[in-house]
Each structure stands twice: as C-alpha cells, then as structure tokens.
Image (cartoon, coloured by chain):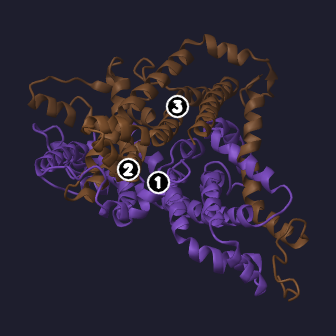
Amino acid sequence: MNRLLRRPAPGTSSTTGRRATGTFVILCAASLVLLLPVVWTVSTSLKPSSDVFAPGLGLIPRHPTLDAYRGVFGTVPFARYLLNSLIVTGAIVVLNVVLCSCAAYAFAKLRFPGRSLMFGLLLTTLMIPMQVNLIPLYRMMVWIHVRVPVLGADTLSGIIAPSAVQVFGIFLMRQFFASIPDALIEAARLDGASELAILRRVILPISRPGLATLTIFTLLQAWNDFLWPLIVSGSDASRTLPVGLALLSSKNTVNWPETMAGSVVTALPMVLVFVVLQRQFIEGLTAGTGKDL
Amino acid sequence: MTSVPLRRPRRPRARRGSGRTDKVGYALVAPAMVLTTVFFFVPMVLSLYWSFNDYNGLQPPQWVGAANYTDLARDPSFRHAVKNTVVFTLVTMIIGPALGLGSALLLNRNIPVRGFFRSVFFLPVTLSLVVVGTLWKTVLAENGLFNHGLALLGISGRAWLDDPSTSLAAVSLASIWQGFGFETVIFLAALQTISQDLYEAARMDGAGRFQSFLAVTLPSLRPTMFFVYVVGVIGAFQAFDQMYVMTSGGPLESTTTVVFYLVQRFQAFDLGHASAAAYLLVVVLAVVSAVQLRLSKRLS
C-alpha cells in the first residue's frame, strides 16, 4: 500500500497547484469532522462529571482529571474485562494462526481423497451468517457447562471455541500457500523432511505477509466481537470489553466521563496496533479484495 | 518422512493414494473440520429443525410445520424489523460507498501527507461497533456535541435517538462514520491500479476530466464496487451491535433489525420463531451470495 502511495497517482498529472490546495483544504476539513467525535470522547473521559454539561463544545477539559478511569477500573470491573479480552483475543489469534495454517497447507499442497469435498464444505460456511447458529451454540455451551463447570457457557472457553477456526483464514492462507512453488516442497521432501517440518521450516517463514494478514484480521475481529460474547457470558467473570462497555453504557446514562473512559479503554489497544502497523493493518483488512476481483 | 530412493527423484511421495501423505493430510485438516462441524454444521442443522418446532428450550420441541414462518410473516414486529433492516441497508449502502469513492478520488491526487489522511479515514474502521455506538449515543444526546454544534449555527437540536422519526437515521449515521473508511481504502487501491495510458488515450480523444471519469474511472472500478456492495449488504443485513448500544431497538421498534428481533425472541424463550427468523436471514443472504457468484463470473 505504501508502495502504491509513493507512486505518482494516475490521473493527477494535470492537477494544478490550486486544485491540490483545494483538495488539501477539503481533506483537512473532512478529517476534522471525522475526528471531532473522537476528540470529544477522549476529552469527556478526562472531565469531572460535574463539567459535562458546562456550556460550549467542551472539546478541551477545563479541569482534567483521571477520576473516570479510576472509576471504571475501581467500581466497574474493567480490569477484569480487559484481562478477559486479552485472553480471548490472544487464544483466538494463536488458534487460528496454527489451525488455519495446518489445514490450508494440506488443502493447498497435499493430495488426499476427499480434499476438494471438505474444502467445498468449509467454503459454504462463508455464505451463512453466524446468527443462525447463535441459539444452538448457546444451548450447547450450557450443556457443556452443566457437565464440565470450567468449560462452556459463562467461561472464556465458551467465547473462544466457536472462533478457534475461522474458515476465511483457511481460505486466505490456502491462496497464499498455493502461490509457493512445489519445487521448494519437493526439495525439502527429498531431504527427508516430514510434512510438519516442511510447513514449519519452509512454508511459514516465506509466508510472513500472509500470516500478518491473518493475524490482524483475526485480532480485530476477536477484539471487537460482540454478539456471541454477549450471549454466552452471563457474569463479569467472562465478559469481554465490548460486552462490559455495552453494559456500562446502558446502566450509566448520567456519568458520561466514565462511559467515555470505558470506550477509550476498549478502543485504545486496537488503535495503538493500527498506528504502529498501519500498512499491514490496511492490507490485512482489505485482503481478498485485490487479485481475485 | 524417511529417505527416498535416488532412482525416483521426481515427485516421490505426494501423489494420490500415497498412504503416508493421506494420513498427514487428514491429520492437518482434522482440527479445522472437527471444530467447524461441531460449532457450525451441527448448530445449523439444529437451528433448521427448531425453526419447524414450537420450542422453549425446556420442554421437548413440538413439530408445527411451517407455522413459525407464517407467524413471522403476520407478526407486525417482524415486518417492522424487516423494513428497518432494508431501510438501514439502503441508506448506509447509498451514502457509505459514495463517501468512500469521493474520499478515494480526493486521496488519489498529489497532495501532501496523503498517508496521514488515509489513516484518519481508516481509524474508525478499527473501532468496535460498541465503542462507535457508545460514542455516537453521547454525541447525539440532547446535550451532546452534535447539538452544541447546531446551536453554534443557530439551529436548535433535539434528542435524535429518542425520536422514532430520526432514530434510524442517527444509527445509520454512526454506522456510516465507522465503515466508509474501509470503502475509501479499497477504492483508493483500485484507483491506483488503473493504467495511466487509459487516461492518456481519453485525453487524446478530447475527453475532459468529467468525461474521462465516466469513460475510464467508473468502468475500471466496477469489480471493486461490486465487491464493496456485496460485503456491505451482507454486513448491513446482520446489523445489531450499534442498535443494541444506541437505542435498544427503540423507540417504538424504530431501530429493531432482523437480528435484533431474533435475539429478542431468543431471550423470550421463543426458540422456534427465533430460528425461523435466522433461517429467513440465511435465505436472503444466500440469494445475495448467489447473485454475487453469477455476476462475478460474468464480469471476469
């Protein structure tokens, strides 16, 4: 993406200086409008609750304080939500990277009876919305929880399990692996490497961009996922940040700084990842929109 | 895999029927297949079965045929939910991609700090819809930023989310704000792959800026637009998070979507109707996907 940005953009050769200035001004104004709600949110989270309804736009807190943050980490168990979100997201990312890579390697480079049928079956799930499974999944998790109390409904495992393998990840990695020349794999086989060793030492090291895409895609999805964690978590013990924030925002109609502080805590980790890994992030989320169109 | 006889150096193992590779292949796909079966295919079948039953989750399901589906067709709440979902999809899918394309065209010009602008447009995409909903619920509240801004212009605002005539528009606004950066980035990437020669040729033929936009840019973007619309429509039909946070589906069901309705039926222990609603969603989205497949074959 950066490579594309550095290249002179097509259709711009006749752009005069005045045009460019006009565009620049429009983009500045648009950015300002886009960012205003974000700035206001951060600012409100730093206000004492008595300042919220003060006249004026209130884009800059007059009496900045961290009270709201103390509130969400004290009276509201945001530390617990944060920890839950970290565990859930971490587990989902690791599981997807490992399991999707394994399956994708087999689908792309190994031949075995039933391969196409199984891959086809997996692909059909991409067309079916997750909501259709919501209720049976919930009942399954309750069933499991009754028998094994540490698993299933109202535990982190219940949130993680249905997202442990995302078919889109298999699809993505298979595309990536398919572009790797067979000769490389043959050579490693001749050297006596096992298939697992080939995957680990030959395929994965040259698939870093694909793995980065998969990681970022899964990371964002797992961190921001809401409906399933909402359904399956019944108490603070298993609530993730979005679920906890929704709860806070529905209970709390008056204490805006606390709600906004909760929003900042929920959003900040992904925003930081985005700021650090912008290129990979944008490429990751627009994966699958390029070549095959 | 152990040593391979030197007499057959080419493709010694990985061919069909080689028992060893078969086993490895099955072992590698097994976790994915098992998990997808248990957590996707089995629930899908259960859900289909329940959609033809009267079922509250406690007593055993009672077969009622297609009654749940015909009930839905008659239920004013469900019809409301369908209408809201369609309106939401139309509004967000007309304004969102248009804003995305407009921003992409601006970002495609030679301007300073292009990368920075692109990041600003993309930033909301990284936010969860719960955060976006919470943020906009506050911004659009009676004492919120939006009305403060309007007051500066001498316009008196109102509680946008508490008024059934504006609530769906307000939720749509928040959704567009969150999503159009994604479309911007996709359109921008597509714009940068259009060959400069095409513009050159158009200029030779005496085309102005607007004419070459119509003759070169738009046709070249067709596959991208197609992708944006399919992904967008599928996403919009599943809208739930922002409604849950901003309005709880209200006021007066004005922001109740199909998925919201489904969750409500589920929480009311009416699993039969909830499953039927879910399957209607499946059918609609399957049609969208089928149309996508058909059209994308014709495009390529």
Of tags 1 and 3, the one toward the viewer is 1
Name the colour assigned to chain B in the rendering: brown
Q: Spatial distance from mark 3 to mark 2, Cα to Cα?
A: 22 Å
Which class describes the residues within 10 Å of circle 3: few (<14), some (14-19), or many (20+)?
many
Give the residue displayed 61% in from the left and 49% down from the top.
A154
**Judging from the image, what is the letter of the chain drawn in purple?**
A
Amino acid under label 2? Val
Query: Mark 1 near mark 3, Cβ–Cβ under 8 Å?
Result: no
Query: Mark 1 near mark 2, Cβ–Cβ under 8 Å?
Result: yes
Residue B169 visible to the viewer:
yes
The image quadrant of residue B28 is bottom right
Circle number at residue A159:
none
Give percent across and percent down for residue A223: 48, 54
Of tags 3 and 2, the one toward the viewer is 2
Circle nearer the N terminus (3, 2): 2
Secondary structure at numbered mark 3? helix
Which chain is mark 1 on?
A: A
Q: Mark 2 points at which residue?
A: B185
Q: Mark 1 points at which residue?
A: A285
Which residue is more in the foreground, A244 or B275? B275
The image quadrant of residue A115 is bottom right
In the rendered image, residues at marks 1 and 3 fall on the same chain: no
Amino acid under label 1? Leu
Which residue is more in the foreground, A255 or A29? A29
